Image (spheres, grey):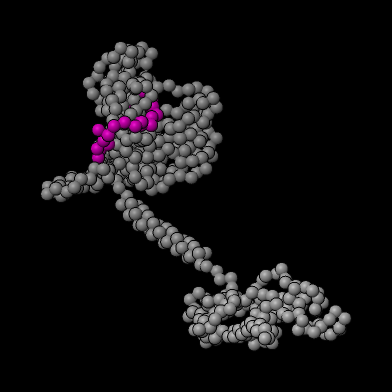
Amino acid sequence: MVPRVEPSSFRPATPTRPLMLALAALAVLPSLANAYSFSFGSTPQQCQNLTIDITGTGQPPYSVLLIPFGPSTLPNNVEVRKITQVNFTGDATSASFQLKYPTDSQFVLVVSDATGFGSGGTSVAATVQGGSNDSSCFDASTNVAPLFDFSVFPNNQLVQCATTRVWWQPDNASMPVFGTPQFHGVIPGGQSFTVPEGPLSTVVGEGLGFNWTVPVRTGTTVLLLGGDDRGIGTAGSGFYIVAQGSNSCLNTTSPSSTPGSPAGGSYPTTTNGAGTGGSSSGSHTNVGAIVGGVIGGVVGALTLGLILFFIQRRRVQQHAEKERPVDLLQDHDRESDDAHPPQYYEPEPFLVPDPTAASSAGSTAPYGSSTPYGGLRPSVDRRASHISGTTAEGSSAAAFLRAGTPDMSASGSSGTRKSPAPPTFRPVNIIQHDDAGPQEQGQEEPETIELPPAYTNIRRAEVPPPESPPPEPEPAPRVPSPPLA
């Protein structure tokens, strides 16, 4: 039987380790040459003959063990299935026997030869198919019972690498024991083994038994069979799932589930006829299936990796497009060589309406009245206005503001004289900003003048600001004449 090597058993190679591995391989070659397995020669059906065929090279005589698996399918849970061992005749490699199991029930097959128990492999749970109305092979109203009972302590559990006591009552008159009981472990779809018996001891309340360290890994399904000289399984079987424990007893020879296809070839494992395929045994390794599985896994991993790569790449591109800024004013490519600002951003000068139009809203007092400034009523609106120095209206306004209070007597008008009303003006303050250009040296600034910015910093050719008209000279003060002598 080929031991199953677990990944945790590999260690760094030493100078003598390659030689040891080579000797181990040579020791295994004879077992590989004698490897064999079995297959179902017919479909399992209620009360019909079931054929088991041996393939490969083993050491006859062969035998097959049928073990009930799962609950009963009969009404009221009546159990009619027995653990049955069928021995092949002589050196025969095929055996046919009646299957005394009801439809839809399950069972496990274990094939052995002269080399030991389970050497031909163990099947997974096979299912009895419908199609047969023959029920003469069992009594659906009577439960079957084992020939004697056995128990384990702790009760109803097996713990990995923990000590378990297997015991029975040897002096039970109703269920006597013939010879020394023998116990076997069966792992469906894996390896089956013989339970080693230590020294027998008697414990009060537990009868006669022995201690056994469970060398099976956590989570493994195990069927524990008890028997005596009357055959394997005469004491029935127990169903266990190995609980978590220590790892102190595990090694490369520890029983476990067989990787790959289970033994038995192709047979139904469900009620609708679906089943499993392939064949293997406890001493046979399907190299082709393993290599094919590895290659398929590598190809699948590469394909999945490519798919994930393209999906991630597409997500990155979509994210980059979402982050790209949108120009609401210009619909052109951001990478254009045009470094000039768009036309929407070009500055435009601020144009003030004609001051004469604004001044028309001035005082309505008649010219020549007693109102100060000759009827020009100062406006309460002190907003800055733009007056061009090149227009007649602007010049008149500036001269008027610099002249001060006009001489009312010089007007020569009277309240009764009708003449065209002169234009009225609204007094304004004019401020010259510094950014309109440097002032000329020596020019006096009679008053503060406000003008809007000239924006010379963005013009191609600087245009000089308009010059302010020179101030008119003030009239000389009148000197009184000396008195006459």
The answer to whether 105 appears left or right of 10 in the picture is: right
Dominant SS type (magenta): loop
Q: Is residue 348 left or right of residue 30?
A: right
* Magenta region: 228-254
Residue 7 in the image: above or below residue 254: below
Q: Is residue 204 left or right of residue 410?
A: left
| Displayed quadrant of residue 224 | top left
Q: Residue at x 26, y 35 (%)?
A: 250
Residue ranking furthest to the front: 485
Image spot of residue 69 (x, y percent): 43, 32
The answer to whether residue 47 is seen in the rendering is no
Q: Residue at x 79, y 74 (%)?
A: 370
Q: Residue at x 53, y 38 (%)?
A: 130
Of residues 258 and 35, which is closer to you in this image?
A: 258
Q: Note whether 241 is above or below 347 in the view shown.
A: above
Label count reads: 0
Q: Quadrant of the C terminus?
A: bottom right
Is 232 magenta? The answer is yes
